[in-house]
Image (cartoon, rainbow, N blue to C red):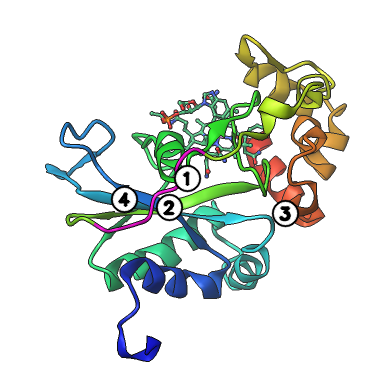
Amino acid sequence: MRGDFAASIPDQIAAALEPYGLVPRGGFVFDEENALSPLIQGTHFRSVVLVGYFGSAIWPHFTRWWQDHRDSQDPLDQWSKDVLTAVATRFGAIAVFPSDRPYLPFQQWGMRAEGLRPSPLGILIHPQYGLWQAFRGALLFDRAIDFASGGPQRHPCDDCQDKPCLSACPVNAFSDGGYDVVRCRSHLASGEGNECLSGGCLARRACPAGHEYAYSAPQMRFHMKAFARG
Ligand code: B12
C-alpha cells in the first residue's frame, strides 16, 4: 500500500517547493573527480538538486511576497533565498543561488541534471517549456541523493530550420559570435527598445518552442527591467 512507505527525498523536496510554484529540476551525484562540485567552506558536496520554475508558475507567489517587501533591492533573489534557505534546512542541505558570486555552473548542472542543451541565445532550451524557464537556486547535499536524472532530451533547435531567434533582435545582438550584451543594453537605454522592455526580449519571444508558456506581461517587464538595470 502506498501510504505504508515514506515518500522519497526527491518527492518530499517537490512537495516542499510546490506551494511556491517552484519545482526540482533534476539532480545528480557529483563524479569522483568532483569536476562540477563547488568547494564551499572547504567542503566538496556529494550531490545537487536544482530548483527552478516553468512559465509563470512562481509569479503569483513571488508577487504576494513582494507586496510586503517593497524596499528589497533584488526582490526575486531575496524571495528565492527566503524560500530555499528554509527548504534546504529542512533537508539538511545548503542552498546556493545563481546570481551569487563566484558564479556556480548552473547551466552545466542543468545540462547534466535535465539533459538540456543551450539554444543559440545561450539560454538552455526545454523541449516542452522552451526558453520560458530558469533556475532559482540549488540544494547541495553532503550525501548522495538518489535523483532519477534525465538523459538527453529532444533538443528543439535541432528541428528548427529558420532559427527566428537569430533574426528577431532589432540590433542583431545575437550571432554565431555570441551575445553582444553591450549592444543589447545600449538599445534598451536608447529609448528605442521599448518593445523589448515592455513586452520582453524579441529574440526570446520569436522562439516557437513552448510558446504557450511565455511569461505573463508583468513578469516579462520585471525581468527585462532587472536586466536593463544591470
Ligand atoms: C552573468 C550572467 C549573465 C550576463 C552575461 C551572460 C554571458 N554572456 O555570459 C547577462 C547579464 C548578460 C545575462 C543575461 C541574461 N541571462 Co544570465 N546569467 C548570468 C549568470 C549569473 C552567470 C553566468 C556564468 O558566468 N556562470 C558561470 C559558469 C562557470 O557557469 P556555466 O554553467 O559553466 O556557464 C555557462 C554560461 O555562461 C553559458 N553562457 C555563455 N554565454 C551565454 C549567454 C547568455 C545570454 C546566457 C543566458 C548564457 C551564456 O555558457 C556557459 C557554459 O555552459 C548565470 C547564472 C549562473 N550562475 O550560471 C545566469 C543565467 C545563465 N542567465 C539566465 C538568463 C535567463 C538570462 C536572461 C535571459 C535574463 C532575462 N532577461 O530574463 C538574460 C539574457 C538576455 C536577454 N536578452 O534576455 C539563466 C539561464 C537559464 C537557462 N534556462 O539556461 C541563468 C542560468 C540564471 C538563472 N537564474 O537561471 N546573464
**Tag on residue 105?**
none
- Say which residue appears at 82% left-offset and 33% top-offset: 206
- Residue range corresponding to the magenta coloring: 145-152
* Pointer 2 residue: 26
Does label 4 point to a residue whose CB lies under 8 Å from ligand 1? no
SS of the residue at dot 3?
helix
**Tag on residue 114?**
1
**Tag on residue 219?**
3
- Identified by mark 4, the residue type is Val
- Identified by mark 1, the residue type is Glu
Whether tag 2 and tag 1 are in contact, CB under 8 A, the answer is: yes
> Closer to the N terminus: mark 2 or mark 3?
2
Residue closer to the observer: 56 or 196: 56
- Identified by mark 2, the residue type is Gly
Instruction: Give how far apart the Cα atoms at labels 3 and 1 are.
Output: 24 Å
Whether tag 4 and tag 1 are in contact, CB under 8 A, the answer is: no
Instruction: Give how far apart the Cα atoms at labels 4 and 3 are.
Output: 28 Å
Q: Is any atom of residue 64 visible in this view?
A: yes
State yes or no: residue 110 in magenta: no
SS of the residue at dot 1?
helix
